[in-house]
Amino acid sequence: MFLQVVQTVADSLDTLSTASSQSELSFVDLLLKGGVILIPIGLLSLISIYLITERYLYIKKATKIDNQFMRNVKDSLYRGDFNAALMLCRSSNSALAKVVERGIMRIGKPIKEIESNIETAGTMEIAKMENNLGYLGVIAGIAPMLGFIGTIIGIIKIFYNISLSDNISIGIIAGGLYEKMITSCAGLIVGVIAYTGYHYLSILIDKFTLQIEVIATEFLDILQEPTKV
């Protein structure tokens, strides 16, 4: 009797183990069950990753500030050697150097004109950093909507099949529903990636905007010190 009980328990465990292994799905299988709507969502995810990476590398390169560069420029301005300061700016590829260069080129003009020129140069550099950044905001809104559309279409198909078969079964409803929820999950993930990338890059640009304001103020202060310039 004891051996029969042990054998029955062992058979039950084997059955549960087999059912569990059959019920497990790989990540790829799960994606394939999401349907055709996952294709545009996948494309949006690739575009998001590309835009985030490309913009991040560009912004980090453009906003890189060499403290020694700024000291040399200030020293040249204090000495009144504007040509040396101009050459230093042109030898640097940073956006800040281009802004300062535009200011140096207007030395001799009224302060208001120099200030306006610096602001214009800063606006142009910021616009370059924000190039294509708006697409991330669009993707952050579209991707979740595509996911919900895929889920709704799947639910419509489920109830349509139920109406044809006249068989209301929890297995039929749950089996079809979990597959269609995959699109919603994928859309939300892509939306979160795009949304996070958009705002993170915007923060980097905002920090650079503040740096431009500080440098522009220091630059104008130097020009208004007649004893040193």
Image (cartoon, rainbow, N blue to C red):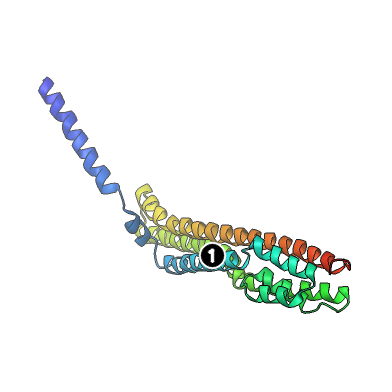
Compared to residue 204, the image places residue 169 above or below, namely above
Q: Which residue is mark 1?
A: 52
Q: Nearer the viewer, residue 119 or 49?
A: 119
Give, as a three-letter code, the residue at label 1. Ile
Q: Position of residue 112 (x, y in %)?
A: 87, 74
Quarter residue 229 falls in: bottom right
Q: Position of residue 115 (x, y in %)?
A: 82, 72
Quarter residue 206 falls in: bottom right
Looking at the image, which residue is at 31% across and 51% down?
Answer: 25
Horizontal arrangement in the rendering, residue 171 relative to residue 63 (left or right): left
Compared to residue 86, the image places residue 143 above or below, namely above
Q: Is residue 220 visible?
A: yes
Horizontal arrangement in the rendering, residue 105 relative to residue 38 (left or right): right
Compared to residue 72, the image places residue 124 above or below, namely below
Please identify the quadrant where the N terminus is shown.
Answer: top left
Q: Position of residue 68 (x, y in %)?
A: 65, 62
Looking at the image, which residue is at 68% across and 59% down?
Answer: 207
Circle 1 sits in a helix, a strand or a loop, which is it? helix
> Mark 1: few, some, or many residues within 10 Å (few <14, many ≥20)?
many
Q: Position of residue 145 (x, y in %)?
A: 54, 63
